[in-house]
Structure formats: structure tokens, C-alpha cells
Image (cartoon, rainbow, N blue to C red):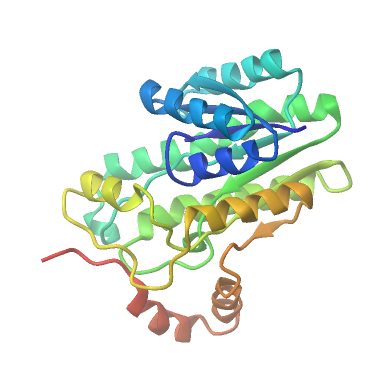
Amino acid sequence: MRVIAITGASAGIGRATALRLARDGADVAICARRRDRLDAVGAEIEKAGGHAFPFVADVTNEVDMNLFVAKTVEQFGRLDVMMCNAGFGIYGAIDDIAPDQMKKLMDINYFGTYYAARAALPVFRRQQRGHIIIVSSIAGKRGVPYMGAYSATKFAQIGMAECLRAELYGSDIHVSVLCPISTPTEFTEVMTRETGNDVTGALGPTQSVEEVADAVARAIEKPVPEIYPYFKSRGLVLLNAIAPGLTDRIVQKFGRKLRV
């Protein structure tokens, strides 16, 4: 039975993964800012067959993340997986994104990941085993129009993960990057609110939160450096490495747009 900690677990991919792992009997520590939503997911975890530890925390707060890990270990005796999932997006050209919006994105998407991973690492080093799963995006491998600010934070996550993976090479501490494509969640709704304009969903292929959760569960069983729930998205990454100019033209058709 594994002990899994998931940030941003009150909805979307975090919630779906918590429930998927609970069905395998996992102990699942979940954190988010919304107590009511967090408690509801906790009840769902218990109903699914797992054990839940809901903890109200803000991923942008280093103290909160340290407490989240410490309380999880106190509750369950150890920590096997830290899934750094909390994040959101803002739509717009780079010169339309206000500095305070960019800072908020970095605080949640990048620093939230950094604080959670940093809090878990001492536990993993002490145990001499563990697994960090960083929820990035295919947009962290290849940017798309008007998602530059969001992509920047996702590229930053991947850069940190690659360095950390190399630093831990040869140990039993694993680092995986999850690169989902567009997934129906609250993401578009939150982006619309944060952007101040009504934004469409992505125009390319999509995948369900359940498909993403299944991919995470497989990676926990057999750790891999990168997780692509939609396997065809690997092709975009390879094409971008070989022919970035051609890829520029291709991704034009897949970007989100403002509703008019």
C-alpha cells in the first residue's frame, strides 16, 4: 500500500488521480485551498477504498508545503509519491500579460511545484526511495499561440525536473514529468476568470481526466522520465525538435481563442 501526496487535488486531474489510486487501496494525502471541496474529495477517496488525509494548504507558501509533507508522514508513517499538480493558465499574447499575472502564474505553477518537491525530498532521501511526479503539459514541450505565459511556467517545471532527475540518477528516487494534452477540467473556466475574457477550449485533441489518472498510476508502478497520456503527442515533441519552423505553422490551428 503506497502513500501518495497530491497538491491541487480538489478538482480536475488531482481529484481523478486521487480516486484512481484510492481504488488500488492507497493512502492519499490531498491539499488545496478550498476546505469544502477538499473534504468532499476526501469522502470520495474513503468510499473508493483508500484512506484520505485532507489538508488545507496554499502551494505558494513554503511553510504550508513543509507542513503538508510533515503531517502526511505523521499520519501514514512515510511518503512514497509527491504529485505536484496545482496550476492554472492565463490566455494572451506576451505583451498583453500583465507583470502581476505572470508573477501569479510563476508563484503557483512553478514555485508551487518547487516548494512541494523540496518538502518531499528530505523524506525521500531519508527513506532512500520515493517518486516525484510533476504535472506539466504538452505546452511545456512545445508552446502554442497565446499561451506563452503558461508555457513558460511549464517549461520551467520540466527544466527543474530534468536537472533533478540527473542529480538523483542511480538512486531509488524517481522524477517523472506528466505532459497531458488539453483535458476537460475547470482549467478553461479558471483561465476565463483570470484572463477577463471568455476563452474557448483547445481546438486540438483532448483526453479525459480518467485517462490521465490511469497514466499516472502506471508510472507509479513502473517509473518513467516522461508520461504522455495521449501517446500521439510524443510526435509533436519529436517534430518540434527536428523542424521547429514547420511546427510553428502546425500549432496555429490548435490554439485557444477568445469567444466573440
Location of residue 39 by image quarter? top left
Please provide percent x and percent y for residue 54: 52, 22
Q: Nearer the viewer, residue 165 or 130?
A: 130
Whether 222 is drawn above or below 249: the answer is above
Judged left or right of residue 26, residue 103 is: left
- Which of the 4 quarters of the picture holds residue 4? top right
Residue found at x 74% / y 56%? 224
Q: Quadrant of the N terminus?
A: top right
At x 50%, y 57%, the residue is 137
Q: Is residue 170 above or below residue 241?
A: above
Kindly give the residue lying farthest to the right in the view shown: 170
62 vs 47, nearest the viewer? 47
| The one of 213 and 256 positioned closer to us in this rendering | 213
Q: Is residue 30 above or below residue 101?
A: above
Q: Is residue 115 visible?
A: no
Find residue 148 and report its horizontal and vertical position in percent: 37, 60
Residue 147: where, in percent of width, then height?
A: 35, 60
Q: Is residue 250 left or right of residue 14?
A: left
Residue 125 can be seen in this image: yes
Say which quadrant the C terminus sits in: bottom left
Left or right of 177? Residue 206 is left
> What percent of the width, then of the height, locates residue 205?
43, 72
Measuring 87% from the left and 42% from the top, which residue is drawn there?
Answer: 171
